[in-house]
Amino acid sequence: MSLSNKGKGVLRPTLLSAAIAASMSTSGVYAQAQEALEEVTVIGIRTSVLDSVEAKRNADVVADVVDAGALSSLPDQSIADALGRLPGVTTVRANGQSSQLNIRGMNGDFLQTTLNGREQASTSGYSESTRWISFDQYPAELINQAAVYKSPKASHIEGGVAGTVELKTANPLDADKEHNFNANVRMSFNDTADEVGADEFGERVTLSYLGKFMDGKVGVALGYSHLEQPNSFTKARAGADQKLGYDSTVDYDEDGEADALPQAFQWHTGNGTDTRNGYLASVVLQPTDNFKAQLDYFKSDFERIDTRHGITVSGLSSTNSYALSDTEVKGGVVTSGRVNITDPKTEYDSSPWFESRSEDQSTQADSDSIGMNLEWNFADRHTLVVDYSYSEGTKTRKDQIVSMHAYDLSTDADGNLEAWEEVAGQSFAYSLNGDGIPTGGFTGVDFTNLDSIRLSRYEEYPHEYTDEVEAFKVDYRFDLEWGAVASVEAGIRFSDRTFDADRGTFLYGSRDGQYNGYCADNLSDIECMPQNLDGFVKVESVEGAPDHLVVTDMDALASSIFGAGNYEGKKVFSRDWTFVESGAVTEEVFAYYLMANIDTQLGSIPLTGNFGVRIVETDVKSSGIQNVGAGNGVEITDDVGITSDSYDHIKYGPEYTDTLPSLNLNFELTEQDYLRFAAAKVMGRPPVAQLKGGAGSWVSINNNTGAEEYNVWTKGSPYLDPFRANQIDLAYEHYFEDGGAVTAAIFWKDIESLVEKQNIYLDSQSERSALFDSLRIIIPGDLDAGELQTYVNNDKGGYIRGIELAGTKTFDRLPGVFSGLGMTASYSYTESETEITGGNFYGETLPLPGLSEHVWSTTVFWDIGNFSSHVNVRYRDEFILNMSIPGGSTPALAEAYTTVDAQISYAFDYGIDLVFSANNLTDEADVKSYGVDGTLGEYSQFGRQFYLGLNYSY
């Protein structure tokens, strides 16, 4: 996909961080000028500043770009780090790394992402299928250029309501020399990893080659990137499993108002290793100036070893089942207290429990993309491009949990366990420390004592999410020079995309403790009882809570108890969500467009741009399992041998068409002043997890009529409408004669509706029956239609609007070494009237996920001879994010944060650079609120990351 309708040229090799600095003042897309730029003999970050500021004058859409040159050395470990410094673009941190992008106040659900102009499969699923791209899957070293399109044109693939992110790899025929080789080696160090038992050292290695053969008619690009580094954190939160946030039903200080009491606590320490391997290969054949064939392959494998341990306290919302004493209430929050367990023999999570917990939340994300592109230029004025692509992404998560409790145990004469119950007299005292890590202490239990601590519950909830997209497109361009119209483009695209999910579970024991005669779940072949841990545990620490036993090898422990291979996840009717949350969504899309490119004058003012329309026909089908009532389904046998006729296979969904006009106009007011205007209608399909058609059910009694009612819960509906919006952009740019620019842009979007979860119970039986019929839900013959829990399009759409200010300035006229100074800065303000429901934590409506009112970024750079350096500071205001929880997600408030990154380098002779860089210099914590301001929700720290290494270019 061309960034401009102007002529193309060869990009200079530059540092990505430098291009970022330049593009912070770019409201137009990076495109090479038709005429060669005046050669300026400078090195370091300034080179990219000058190139980018000059090149943006040829933009034909509103966008920002970072350019890495021909696979040169880069400071960022993923492309998300680089894009997160662009104006109006922010990142969401996961495990301390940038993984998801938000653009202009909208989260990843509103973004489209392409690689070399091709739609990419997602590997971001964690607790449900997702559409957005996990950008830490893409090594920055293997990406040659990245553009964020903020205004679309008709030739762009639809789907970017917030914007479209296009990643590009290098064309070897554009390389400077016949043979080009780059090698980058970095050693990394995390300054807190050893505190949690992780290896603090890691490494990054990148090798790349660009070669031209047969007199420049054949080009080959090869790239390999390896990353291995600690994945470690310290975390505390006011929640555990389904018990999240605060209970506000009891008035503890007797002031007439209920106070907020944490429902649960978790103190966690995580340690592991991130290992990512990226591979790139491109072969380009261009035997003549009129024909080019290019084959691209990109592969990335990302393994995250994520083992965790700590102390969990849960069940505190069952306020009538225990004694709470020594309470202190501040600002309506019970900030300290002592929990005394009065009866250790309770069932089904009906009273508090204390446990040492070990988890394995390791993930494996694999992505593969291949594409073939053929381009013909014929009869001087015609260009035909044919492109085929296939992309596949797979994400798996282990989700393995061991809960350990303190027991009073009795054995027979042979030492066999014959009686057990939890230790009596346990109590827990806590003290909150604002939104930081709280302090917890226990009496009556020693979490390091192997004589009493036993395995109480073993759980596995394996996840597998796959995404496949196959596409074929044809684009045609005719250069006609007909008045104001310089050329006309038309094209078609067909794509077939399938999202699939496979869920299961293995459960043994009780999370709230066992006693003779009570075991919450047992999917194993052995008797349910507390299990000995000897030989499989060690003692570890966690900040804020006592030392405790930690399982050293969870698979070995499980094999010793259940037998090797006898604890794999199963689909069982007793947990029918394992069927409902599995299933597929398919989307067949046929799109076609017509677009005219403008190159004319309006009086004395040069005018360029484009206008056109894209028509998109979408066919959505959801397939899965639905509970239709006993005797109404087909016989299905689950993985433990139980056969049921209450379930049936379903496949259904709508077809719809969108017409998407677009206009981009660029006015060259003077040689230094540009005005840009863009308007478009855009669309993006709903989050894929909310398109699932599988459903579970339960039966209840209507208190008024006495009738039995059939109630249905579902993960979503394929009949959800896509996100649709109208948008306008207006930008002004002024360029300084001695380099640099200042820009100002305003944008406005009007979103028709959003998607939210609702519990629907209509007034009359006829209305409820009609609703069920419209959604293809079968009601058992002897039951009435009842409540429906699902996702719907709401009426809470509205405007998103904002302003973006940016500037870039190099100080060439300062004396001596100070002439190498430069600075870039950007600020954006975004506001919206759109709303979503409060989810698990909030009773009131919330702003649109991803929206931060204030965002700013500043980079100061300094080049002195062979020495180059820069420091970047980024600030993001608070925002709502969709936080993963068991079975889905819920809105949570992410607190404001500021991050500081820096890099210095020195260029030696013979193409060798010495580089030192540091990320998160202030060790900024990741803080989330669970509905109570200024009080613990979730607090995580990941440490500072340092890199030292060498670059070699030949």
Image: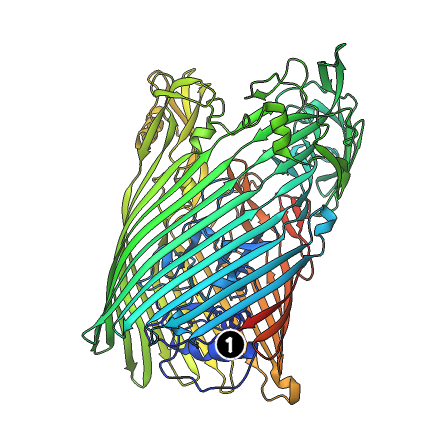
Quadrant, the N terminus: bottom left
Depth order, front residue of 10/321: 10
Q: State the image coordinates of residue 186 (x, y, percent, origin top left).
A: 62, 63
Q: State the image coordinates of residue 903 (x, y, percent, origin top left).
A: 63, 69
Q: State the image coordinates of residue 726 (x, y, percent, origin top left).
A: 36, 58
In the image, 824: left or right of 597?
right
In the image, 103: left or right of 929?
left
Vertical arrangement, residue 383 with respect to residue 337, above or below:
below
- Indicate the secondary structure of the residue bearing disc 1: helix
Q: Amino acid at mark 1?
A: Ser
Residue 768: quarter of image: top left
Q: Which residue is mark 1?
A: 48
Q: State the image coordinates of residue 342 (x, y, percent, origin top left).
A: 75, 21
In this orientation, does residue 553 appear?
yes
Q: Residue at x 51, y 66 (%)?
A: 87
Q: How is the image coloured?
A: rainbow
Vertical arrangement, residue 75 with respect to residue 675, above or below:
above
Depth order, front residue of 5/275: 275
In the image, 747: left or right of 494?
right
Q: Residue at x 44, y 73 (%)?
A: 179
Vertical arrangement, residue 529 with respect to residue 751, above or below:
above
Depth order, front residue of 538/456: 538
Q: Residues within 10 Å of mark 1 (few under 14, many from 20)?
A: many
In the image, 762: left or right of 339?
left
In the current view of this chain or complex, which residue is farthest to the left?
379
Q: Residue at x 61, y 22 (%)?
A: 348
Residue 648: quarter of image: top left
